[in-house]
Image: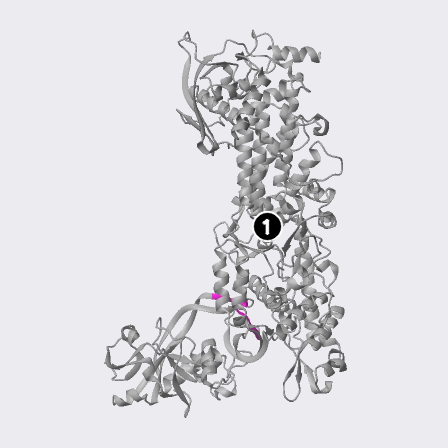
Amino acid sequence: MLLCRVSAVSQTLARWGCRSHRGGGLVHRALSFSSSRCRAASSGECEAGSAQGRYRHTVLLPRTKFPIKLSGQELLDKELEIQQECGFAELYSWQRERKAKKEFCLHDGPPYANGDPHVGHALNKILKDIRNRFEMMRGRQVHYIPGWDCHGLPIELKALGELGTRDLSPLQIRQKAREFAEKAIARQRAAFQRWGVMADWDQCYYTYNGAYEAAQLRVFQEMHSKELIYQDYKPVFWSPSSRTALAEAELEYNLEHVSRAIYATFPLITLPPKMQAAGLDGVSVLVWTTQPWTIPANQAVCYMPNAQYSVVKRADTCQLLLVATERTANLATLLGTELKSVVTFTGSQLEGGICKHPTIPDKEVPLLPANHVTMAKGTGLVHTAPAHGMEDYSVASHFKLTVECMVDEDGKFTELAGSELQNLSVMSEGTDKVISMLKECGALVKEEQCVHSYPYDWRTKQPVLIRPSKQWFINTASLKDKAKEALQKVRILPESARGSLLAMLDRRTYWCISRQRSWGVPIPVFYHKETGEALINKHSVSHIAKLFKENGSDCWWELPIETLLPEEVLKKSKAGPVTDYVRGEDVLDIWFDSGTSWAAVLEEEMEGDDEEPESRLSWLPAPLRKPLVAESDPRADAYVEGKDQIGGWFQSSLLTSVAVRKKAPYKSLVVHGFAVSEKGEKMSKSLGNVVDPDTVINGGKDPSMPAYGADALRWWVAESNVFSEVQIGPTALNSARDSINKLRNTLKFLLGNVQGFDPRVEAVDPKEMHYIDQYMLHLLREYSIKVTDAYSEFDAGRVIRVLQAFITRDLSSFYFSIIKDRLYCDPEDSLSRRSCQTVLEEILDGVSRSVAPILPHLAEEVYLHAPGHDEGETLFKSGWIKSSSVWRRPGLEEAVEGACAIRDSLLSTIPGKNAAQYDLTIAIEPGLLFELMESLQEEPTSTSSQLVELMMVARVTLTSELPRDLPPDALLSHGTFLINLEGGVIREDSAYSIAVLPTSGARCLRCRRYTAESADCLCPRCQKVVSQAN
């Protein structure tokens, strides 16, 4: 009868095309009360006593050696043991060798090899590893080659310390810098391995590797051949403290920088025609600048052509000043005097005016129109020094003004500035002297302190200046539109980062890529000794690239110039004898170093002539190439880095790739925030809030920092909202540890209850399972889908939230509480118990796999204790969560959720009481809901049906109407359960009533259910089990 009834319901629902979802969608509960399904009645605790004690050995309680908690040295030893026993070091190579239809490529942005590993590294590397392990587990071949950015000034400075560079040759400097970088890399690599990051750590890429440098030069040559790289004399950011040019990405802006701002006059010696007609005389142009030291380099004063300008008269001195009309009121307040307007002009009417330079006799400077003039501050008239400002230089280029540099590489005035200023540091005593000179000649109107944003060298933390020098540049202006077009095809997480990336592209008109240092990739250029003309072409660069591949870039200094520039290259270049040339001394910007990593790591192997730009770096060693798979694409699936790389590696990689390949090097960008203290402060040694990841794992001297282990560090990364600033400290780490311990508790329960169960031979077919067991498989499938989607979105935080909800709501509070009686007290090999164990093993497997990318050590530890696999097999080599579409059966959700709705009514009727002590009568009008409940209980009255198990009561009576002769102490409740199918096309709102009465049964001495005939005997089920056991 039961099977017939189930079949009938299933056929009915299949015919209707049932598609329902628990807690929402097509199936809704409409009840006359508010209650949660998850409030399970307790089955009570075991009481001491000889009667109950003699049956204890017949109860199948959980058994497992899996520890509920690990801490201290025991935890650390276990993690290292797991790494060794489960082959963490070989996992990456194993998955590269297996066959796969699809590849997932996450290109590693190289960390800088200038110090110890920090929590920023942990955040970045673990975030990447979580995604890589997920992709590997679901069958993709992961391409992930860790790398290091090895060149640059910070390494050079740290390596040399107090020695400086003055008495060392370039090769000596490079040797010390290389040794320093290698030591830093070794420390960082060891930390990444300890964190469980999956990679082949013997096959990494390093920007000082000869093959990498060769790839970089090929990109340089391709861009040079397209005239995107050129040499010019123009203003660049210059760091006196580093004695080198800097790119925008190497600056950081100090918002609290204090400058000595001045207002100074430039007397008009040739009035504009309109001003002459007004009969004015003795007018001075008033300018404002925050960089007084640039006044000696002034070549013009600029105005806004469409703005209004006024000649005003000071009430206190009668001095005539030319200023922007809209700035008059502010200036009057600043100067503390009335400024009376004499005459007003439009900016364009100032054309033809010429001023006298205030500090340089006989020097004249013109009034010129310019678009960069603003009215936000100052006087509306801009002092213009083409050697020391980007906009100023543009004006000079347009009007062919002289660009004279009066400042040397140390930031001191040269002899061009005059004897009074020569050798003075422009940012300190040089500024003092210029202001003094302006005061002496009567040109200084006012001085004030100005707090504003100012660029600093990100390495030395000292202010920079702008000065012209002969440098190599990339014409980013011609690449911007193509880069923006390429970005339209790139997915960016979070999407808000797209605006920042586009804004930084807009601000960058050119990119200075030459540096006046020794530790870097030499720019492969030769200069004619007499003319200074550069010799650089595809022939010379290809030859140098081959030498770098074979010998490394040290050969630029080690080999004679005849080897670097051989006769055949000179002939192809149509150049004179090699004795006419000297090698260049500049090296490439490290952002160009790392920005060409796609060429060394992602570029596929192709045939071709090495000398042709289209040849795709075929000389690279195999470990550095991206192997071809069925769906080869030279772009990485993802670049994942901190938000500081929006103006750094993300941008430099984009520009170089678009220049050479006309496409972005990535399909998606993931931009994460920075690691900060628990108070949200930037970590600083001076503040004492630096969190060392090694201390997090191994513990520190302070008792507040115990050994948390690597998995806790990984959980912290996963649980955090990585798209904003990520806080770390004892609170966050304790929370991570506690969450892992709670998870271990659940896993221990699962392991204990599948002990001795072999799913390979004892698993029950889903069609033969109890409905509640089938329902849990359905929930497990839904869980696996949610987790898979979250990992695919780089949202490990959502994975954890879904995991915790599944464990708390669906397992601990619902399923586990319902099945314990069947699990512990039914016959060991009964269908009912094996059905339950089959589901528990599936849940154990699914939960272990779902959390494995985040907690690889714990997942493998669980797998060592879990049944159903051969010895030596590891979880990571056995795939992703195994869920089946057959776990979703028509009528399944409705049957279980209908029963849960009725149980909610029951529990709200007896708040705080033990449901096991009650009998329940359920009355349902004939219809679909009644048939669903009949599928759970064939007999009218039962103490052992699936419906009784779900209700967790002593007895259930299922009827079409409540008896009229109910006892007066019966508790009544009513409710409805709405079945909504086909989007509302088929709806059935079924009413039900329940009556709750204290049970007349006695408590069974073995199972503690109230189903025994008397207090001194067992219930019928337990009598049978015990008799069979004896």
Going 45% across and 31% down the picture, which residue do you hit? 985
**Disc 1: which residue:** 127
> Which residue occupies the foreground of this view, 829 or 706?
829
Q: Secondary structure at mark 1?
A: helix
Decide whether residue 246 is among the magenta residues. yes
- Report the quarter where the N terminus lies: top right
Q: Is residue 281 visible?
A: no
Residue 692: x and y in percent read 59, 52
**Dot 1: few (<14), some (14–19), or many (≥20) neighbours within 10 Å?**
many
Please, what is the three-letter code of the amino acid marked with disc 1?
Answer: Leu
Tell me: residue 938, above or below residue 510.
Answer: above
* In the displayed structure image, the side of residue 207 where residue 263 appears, left or right: left
Q: Which residues are magenta?
A: 243-253
* In the displayed structure image, the side of residue 451 where residue 868 appears, left or right: right
Tell me: residue 420, above or below residue 829.
Answer: below
Residue 147: x and y in percent read 66, 59
